[in-house]
Amino acid sequence: MGMWGKRDDMVVHGREPFNAEPPAAALAGAAVTPVDAFYSRNHGPVPRLDPAGWRLTVDGLVARPLRLTLDALRSRFDATEATVTLQCAGNRRTDLTSVRAIPGETPWGPGALSTARFRGARLADVLDRAGIAPDAAHVAFHAPDVSASADPPQPYEVSVPRDRALAPDVLLAWAMNGAPLPPVHGAPLRVVVPGWIGARSVKWLTRVTARTTPSDGYFQATAYRLPPAGGDPEGVALGPLPLNCAVLTPADGAVLPSGPAEVTGYALAGEGRTVARVEVSLDGGRAWSRVALEEPAGPGAWQRWRTTLGLPAGDVHVLARAWDSTGAGMPESPASVWNPKGYVTNSWPRVRLHVR
Ligand SMILES: Nc1nc2c(c(=O)[nH]1)N[C@H]1C(S)=C(S)[C@@H](COP(=O)(O)O)O[C@H]1N2
Ligand SMILES: [Mo]
C-alpha cells in the first residue's frame, strides 16, 4: 500500500504536500471510487486531529454560537447520505499545458476527481440551530492545516455564498463509503459542496463562520480565481463547476489491434444540472456518435459512459464532448479556455491511439 492508504499505482504528483490521482483505469472501474483510489489534493501537511478533543465552532453572525463535539453533531442532527463527485479545479490541467506552460501548478490528468458515498449532517440544519442572521451573506469554513504555498503562509479557509450554504445537499461529512473519514480526506469532519470546485469542500473543518463578505483568505481571495485580465481587476472567483468530460480507457498513447474497441469515460455537470448526452468522434469532430451514459447516482455525481468503436489501422484520435441538461456544450480547443493558473479545463478530451 502507498502513502496515506492509497494504492501503489496512484499517480503521485507530490508527497509533501500530498497530491495524487488514481490511474485512469482504476477510476473507470467503479461508479463509487474506492477510498484507496480517491484522488487527494492538499496545500499543506495533513493535520492529525484527535477526534476526542476536536470541536466544531459555529460563530460570526449567528444568534446562538455553537461548540459541538463529534458525538453532539451526530446525535443532535439528522444524518443524511449522498453519492457526490468531488473535482479539483485543476482537473485535466495537462490539456492546458499542451498549449502553454503553467509553472508551479500540479499537472493533473483526468483523475483529479472521484466519487464517494458521503454521510453527515446538513450544514443548513446546523446553521439553522445556530440562528444564522439575515445579513450573513457568506459562510466561511476554517481548517488548521497551514499552507506554505499561500502568501503569506496561513491556515486553509474559504467561503460559499449563503444560498449555497443553506441548500440541503451541502454536508458536514464524517464518513465516506461507510467508514470514518481517513486523515488525508479530512478526519474527523469535512464540508461537501456538490457541483462546486473541490476547494470549497474544506477538510479538517474546525470552524464555520457566518459573515457579510466572502473569506479574505488566500484560497478564496487569490487562488481558485481566474486571475485579473482584460480590465477586470478582481478576477473571477470559481465556484460552480462547468460541464466536463474525459476519456479514461483506452489510455492516451495505447497501442491496439484494429477492429472493435471499448472506450469508456466520464462526464460531470455542475450544481443543478445533469449530463444529457456524450458523443465521440474518430475523424477530428466531423462525425459524432452517441455513447451509452449512466444515470447519475445523485445530484453532483459523475456519470460514466461507454461505447464500442471500430478502430481503423493508423494513428487514431478519439475525441469526446458532452452536453448538459441546459443544452450547453464544451469548447473544442484547450487554447480557448487557457488561463494562467490552469483552472476548470473543459475542452474536448482527446486520446491518441496507435492502431495496428
Ligand atoms: N483544509 C483543507 N481543505 C481542503 C484542501 C486543503 O488543502 N486543506 N484542499 C481542497 C481542494 S483544492 C480539493 S480539490 C479537495 C480535495 O479533497 P480530497 O483530498 O478529499 O480529494 O479538498 C479541498 N479541501
Ligand atoms: Mo482542488
Image (spheres, rainbow, N blue to C red):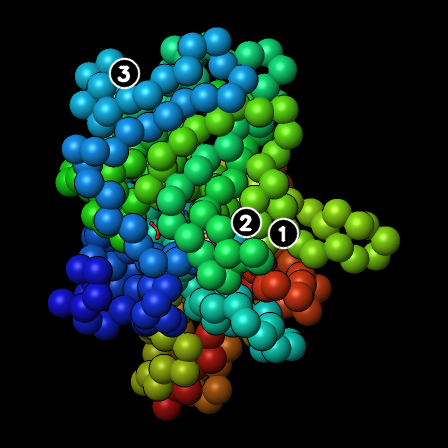
The residue indicated by pointer 1 is: 222
Kindly identify the amino acid type of the residue bearing the numbered disc 2. Phe
**Residue 179 locus on image (x, y percent):** 15, 40
Label 2 secondary element: helix
Residue 99 appears in the figure: yes
Q: Quadrant of the C terminus?
A: bottom left
Q: Earlier in the sequence, mark 3 or mark 2?
A: 3
Image position of 146 (left or right of 6): right
Residue at point 43% right, 64% down?
110
Label 1 close to label 2 by CB (< 8 Å): yes
Of the numbered discs in the image, which one, if any, rests on residue 308? none
Q: Earlier in the sequence, mark 3 or mark 1?
A: 3
Label placed on residue 77:
3
Residue 181 left/right relative to 356: left
Q: Nearer the viewer, residue 117 or 137?
A: 137
Marks 3 and 2, Cα distance to the nearest angstrom? Answer: 29 Å
Question: Residue at the spot x=29%, y=50% of the render?
Answer: 47
Q: In which quadrant of the rendered view does residue 71 lie?
A: top left
Which quadrant does the N terminus fall into?
A: bottom left
Residue that mark 2 sits on:
219
Q: Position of residue 102 (x, y in %)?
A: 60, 73
Q: Are marks 3 and 2 in contact (CB under 8 Å)?
A: no
Whether the residue carrying mark 2 lies under 8 Å from ligand 1 is answered with yes
Secondary structure of residue under mark 1: loop
Cα distance between the residues tagged 1 and 2: 6 Å
The span from disc 3 to disc 1 (Cα, nearest Å) is 34 Å
CB within 8 Å, label 3 to label 1: no
The amino acid marked with disc number 3 is: Phe
Which of 190 and 21 lies nearest the eye of the viewer? 190
